[in-house]
Image (cartoon, helix red, strand yellow):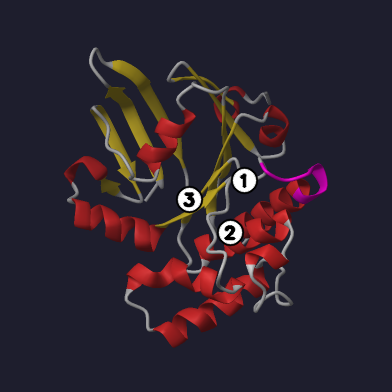
Amino acid sequence: MNSIVELENVEREYGHPPVRACAGVSLSIAPGELVAIVGPSGSGKSTLLNLIGTLDKPTSGVAMISGADIQRLTDRQLSALRAHRIGFVFQQFHLSDGVTAVDNVADGLLYTGVPRAVRRERARRALDKVGLSHRHTHKPAQMSGGERQRVAIARAVVGDPPLLLADEPTGNLDTSSGAAIVELLHELNRSGTTIIVITHDVELARMLPRQIAIRDGRVVSDSRLTGANL
């Protein structure tokens, strides 16, 4: 497979009269890339995230994700694709306050059919991978913001998905914690995970090898094509 993400003239409209949140986006992301999709609020980044993450389908155009045409998949097939092929990291962490880091991470395997004991063992390994071997039994309230985001990343990668989508992963963190998360994303990418970071932060985007800028639902620049950074 040449691309893990392949969008061809993808459009997404909402409402009546229709508003085009995605206005003919075409882009290709190869396995193993580390990419920033960057743009201001209202540029269409969230819509693009939803399309790439198979949380939404295009109004028109073709969206191939991990080799599957999402227009042709049933809801059950889309859920299976997300469970096994895509990991999600969000700005707000979305951790359960009352449970330990291990159980928060193990929840990332809930829909894969893996037995609970195996889920928890994989969760421990994922936490070790993101540098939290000393936090297995801690709950979110006992951890810093940077540590909570590492737990969220561990949960996203516990099933070894080939594609990781990170939506403003440093948005709630101070500069030092944010830089540590960026380095962690680089480490995960070096181990083979394709990573797409959605952000409004141009400085964060510049830390990644490829930047795709989006505005008004359209791709306005792509550093892989132009050879220039933002």
Q: Which mark is residue 184?
A: none
**For residue 180, above or below residue 20:** below
Relative height, residue 214 to residue 196 (above, below)? above
Relative to 37, 217 lies left or right: left
Q: Does the magenta run of residues contain 176?
A: yes
Q: Is residue 160 magenta?
A: no
Residue ID for mark 3: 31
Q: Which residues lie in the magenta part?
A: 172-177
Decide: is 28 above or below 158: above
Residue 191, quarter of the rendered image: bottom right
Which residue is depicted at the point 57% across and 75% down? 102
Horizontal placement of 160 versus 15: left or right?
Answer: right
- Which of pointers 1 and 3 lies earlier in the amino acid sequence? 3
Residue at which label 2 appears = 153
Residue appearing at x 45%, y 25% in the figure: 44
Residue pointed to by mark 1 = 169
Q: Residues within 10 Å of mark 2 (few under 14, many from 20)?
A: many
Q: Secondary structure at mark 3?
A: loop
Locate residue 5 relative to residue 122 in the image: left or right: left
Asked if marks 1 and 2 touch (Cβ < 8 Å), the reply is yes
Q: Gap in Å between the C-alphas at discs 1 and 3?
A: 21 Å
Q: Is residue 34 left or right of residue 183?
A: left
User: Image quadrant for the C terminus?
Assistant: top right
C-alpha separation, residue under disc 3 versus residue under disc 2: 19 Å
Q: Residue at x 64, y 26 (%)?
A: 227
**Residue lying at 77% horizontally and 50% vertically, measured from the top left:** 177
Ranked by sequence position, the earlier of labels 1 and 2 is 2
Q: Are marks 3 and 2 in contact (CB under 8 Å)?
A: no
At numbered mark 2, what does the secondary structure look like: helix, strand or loop? helix
